[in-house]
Image (tube, rainbow, N blue to C red):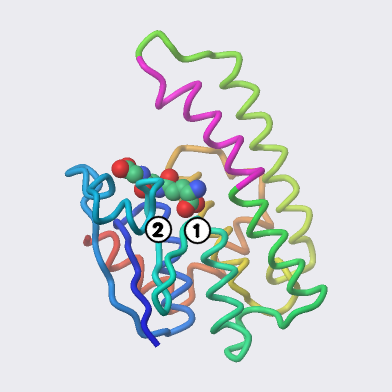
Amino acid sequence: MSLIFYYAPMSTATLTALVLEELGVPHDRKKLDLKAGDAKKPEYLKVNPNAKVPAIIHDGVAMWESSAITMYLGEQFGVAKGLYPAPGPKRGEAMKWIAWTNVTLGEAVYRRGHSGEWAAPEAGSPKMLEQANKDIAELLGIVDASLAGKEYLLGAEYTLADTHLNSFCDWLRHSQIDFSTFANVNAWTARCTARPAYQRVMAVEMGK
Ligand SMILES: N[C@@H](CCC(=O)N[C@@H](CS)C(=O)NCC(=O)O)C(=O)O
């Protein structure tokens, strides 16, 4: 088995780093310096033509998009370890949360960035920013309500759906999105971040 992981610290690839650490799957790590343009180099574009991290190559096949990678690694290695559901409705629930993180929550977060902090001077749009903030609060409200009376997204057991969405929430908190009203989310995050795999990855990522 050969598995190569292309990453940059404190990026979307951190989601995948956490998934790999939870699974304990041996792999080769290839660090990219995004500021130096490593993702745009021809040799990397052969792996991921989108010029972004994360990407993996598993047994010679390249894969990109963090949500697909979480689901794929879960399916390949997570079921036996109790970290990803076997095929069936529970698997569907895990996929629902992983896809929702990137597509639905991700859309609102990118829209917020483009209308605010990432916009060129004078190009931001306060109205769009306000709408994006409202939408993000509504979406986090969905997570909060879903976690009521539950330890984790799928119930009593931690799964890679938790790894994925919680790591995405790290980025949102870093972007000063207000989590103060989401008590269930905050309690769940405390459970997710207390995990030894999380602690190990973040110690390395923050030290770079
Ligand atoms: N939808 C992609 C997004 C990946 C993405 O945006 N990665 C950023 C880092 S957070 C990147 O590699 N940017 C390239 C660059 O900055 O050169 C995924 O979920 O994998």
**Residue 170 visible to the viewer:** no
| x and y, in percent, of residue 60 in the image | 39, 75
* 146 vs 88, nearest the viewer: 88
Q: Main secondary structure of the magenta part?
A: helix
User: Mark 1 CB in 8 Å range of ligand 1?
Assistant: yes
Label 2 with label 1: CB-CB less than 8 Å:
yes
Compared to residue 30, the image places residue 107 above or below, namely above
Q: Which residues are magenta?
A: 103-120
**Residue 87 visible to the viewer:** yes
Q: Which of the labelled discs sits on residue 170, or is there none?
A: none
Q: Which of the labelled discs sits on residue 66, or is there none?
A: 1
Badge 2 marks a residue whose secondary structure is loop
Which residue ends up furthest to the left in the rendered image?
36
**Callout 2 amino acid:** Pro
Asked whether residue 22 is drawn in magenta, I would say no
Asked whether residue 109 is drawn in magenta, I would say yes
* 44 vs 91, nearest the viewer: 44
Q: Which residue is mark 2?
A: 54
Compared to residue 58, the image places residue 123 above or below, namely above
- Quarter in which the N terminus is drawn: bottom left
Compared to residue 136, the image places residue 202 above or below, namely below
* 101 vs 188, nearest the viewer: 101
**Local crowd size for mark 1, using a 10 Å CA cut-off: few (<14), some (14–19), many (≥20):** many
User: Mark 2 CB in 8 Å range of ligand 1?
Assistant: yes
